[in-house]
Image: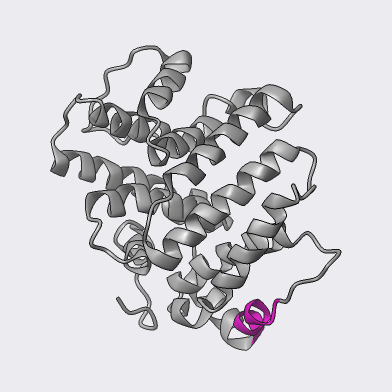
Amino acid sequence: MIFDPHPQRKFFETCGLALILDTQFEKDAPMGNIAKNRISDVILACLIGLGTQATPIIPRCLEWLDTAISHDEDFGTSRNFHRMALHWAKALGLWINDGLNRVEIWNKVRQFDEAALMQDQNVWPKNLIAKDRLDDYMAFCYQAEQYEVGVAEFEKYYGLKTMSLKRTLKPREFAYILCLNKLNYKFNDATLFEAGRNMLQANLEENWLGRGQYIRAATWLKLVHWEHNKTLLPFEVLLRAYDDMPNVARPEFVNG
């Protein structure tokens, strides 16, 4: 299913935005998981022109995430996967809030991803470990400035690989090249940016946003657009999605 901002906008105007802003702390609720979902909601709100209206929830979400992390909130079937998800939401929430990349938090995301793979059972189907899971892991490595680790993990599955930037890269391949670029395997900046945009165009509208994977989509928008131009504000980065969704026009209610 391709992302459609119009019904989402209608829902948010009817009740969705109010539901987000009315979220309060509940002692016996998994507030870390709730906060993670609210960060996802803020990303969606930005994409439908209501980001500014939704941002008041972010400080509360960050507080709830900190509480959940410090108390090691138990949720789902994999404790390490939940730890990873909480730190991922925190890293993105902080970036949306102040435009700064938190290397140390991204490194914790990476470490908990590794722990989930090595210690927990059936977190990923075996056929997705070198695909979807590696996509995420490579993004974590780059933002954690663990470039050598990212390169080694990619090459563990695919070997030393030379890739043409003229074809559409998989997310893991694009992040692999980003890591190599930081290790002095220099690529042309304009060509690298274009390769990132081609990767987004192959994934954003259907694989990520179309499936409600707003945190994942925001992560890759950050990797492509913010890494290329760090003068962009976080909401400006998120709205670049409309430049990279061939079948989704920017609606009239979205500015910026």
On the image, which quarter does residue 251 sit in? bottom left
Q: Is residue 221 left or right of residue 42?
A: left
Q: Is residue 206 left or right of residue 250?
A: right
Is 18 above or below relative to 141?
below
For residue 16: magenta?
A: yes
Could one spot residue 153 in this view of the protein? yes
193 or 86, nearer to the observer:
86
| Residue placed furthest toward the front | 70
Q: Position of residue 220 (x, y in %)?
A: 40, 48
Assign the N terminus to one quadrant of the image.
bottom right
Magenta residues? 15-23
User: Which percent across, then down, holds residue 53?
Assistant: 49, 83
Residue 218: give x, y in percent of width and height: 44, 56
Front residue of this view, candidates 8 and 181: 181
- Residue at image location 42% in from the left, 26% down from the top: 150
| Circle count | 0
**In magenta segment, residue 65:** no
* Coloration mode: one colour
**Residue at image x 13%, y 36%?**
188
Percent across and percent down for residue 219 are 44, 50
Note whether residue 206 is visible: no
Front residue of 119/175: it is: 119
Residue reaching furthest to the bottom = 14
Tell me what residue is drawn at x 27 percent, y 23 percent. 163
As displayed, is residue 38 above or below residue 108? below
Residue at 65% across, 85% down:
15
Q: Nearer the viewer, residue 131 or 36?
A: 36
- Helix, strand or loop for the magenta stretch, by majority: helix
Quadrant the C terminus occupies = bottom left
